[in-house]
Amino acid sequence: MDSKSTFNSLHGIRDNALLLSLGHQYLCGGQFLVKIGLSVNSYLNQLKDDIVTLKKKFPGKFLQEQEVDTDGIVNELYKISKWLQEPDKNIQKKCTAGELGRELEEGVDTIALSIDEIWDQVEGRGVTYSTRDSAANFFGGIKSAIGSAAKPVVKTVLLTIKISFLLCTIAALGFFALYMTMETEGKYLKQIRKIDVLILPQSEIIAKCNREIGEISRQVESIRERSETRQSLMQVMDLNVKIDELSMTRQEAEVKINLYENDRIEKEEKLEQVRKKPFMDRLFRRK
């Protein structure tokens, strides 16, 4: 979403939400959920400090009706963090279904909107009229403009407008309901973009591990070329342990990338199927 909420803490929580939203069984294992829960908890602590710092930029003091309540939203996110840190079968089931990721992402979107509102107050932007207020002003202007006209004509015109508006609203709501539940390209494009965002950092981890393993391997060769002593053997053992640790980290990243890529292929196939289906067939769910 296009937001002024550029806090790194908020981006960190959103990245974890994207990861959970994939719903892969591997990623929903207890140990992995605990890691995500601890990460989200850490970002939430940072986010609370970021919000306090932002509010301090407001010139003066917030009135009670002005101050945006972010604590309630943050506390709800803390609940999700706690669930992740203490995962049971129900939590793992919700994770596999993608529900945990969606709940966390919805919370991030909500807190981002609240932060945007605080930014507006800090930067002194005025309050905008709602759509309902604008409509009320619009119809109020019509009544004022035709106030001197004959009342029977006014009543007939207003009744016609109301009936037309009601019929148009019913038709629009029906179309909107069909459109919102229609299978669209955007749904799969969004999922593919999420997967691409998750693949990049794992690729960087693999590249970093390869560089470090190469450097350590050269150190081991250099030590072995010298005379073997008790100290040199201990150094080689320590370096080999580091290589094993890096190899495990690399393997974990490779497994994740493999899962992401398989998921991406599946989403691309569904996207291609949607693109081939005519709009009206998708709207009315024709096979």
Image (tube, grey):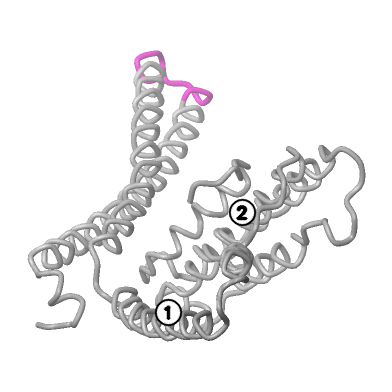
The amino acid marked with disc number 2 is Ala
Check disc 1: other Cα within 10 Å, few if <14, some if 14-19, many if 20+: few
Q: Residue at x 82, y 56 (%)?
A: 67
Residue 118 picture location, percent across and down: 73, 49
Which secondary structure lies at badge 2? Answer: helix
Q: Residue at x 29, y 80 (%)?
A: 178
Residue 209: name its quadrant: top left
Image height of 269 relative to 100, above or below: above
Q: Exactly how many numbered labels are in the figure?
A: 2
Span of residues in magenta: 224-232
Which residue, given by chain and number where applicable, does mark 1 sit on? 165
Residue 185: name its quadrant: bottom left
- What is the CA distance from the residue labelled 2 to the residue labelled 1? 35 Å
267 to the left or right of 152: left
Which residue, given by chain and number where applicable, does mark 2 sit on? 112
Q: Residue at x 9, y 82 (%)?
A: 287
Residue 103 picture location, percent across and down: 53, 70
Image height of 199 relative to 102, above or below: above
Q: Residue at x 51, y 26 (%)?
A: 230
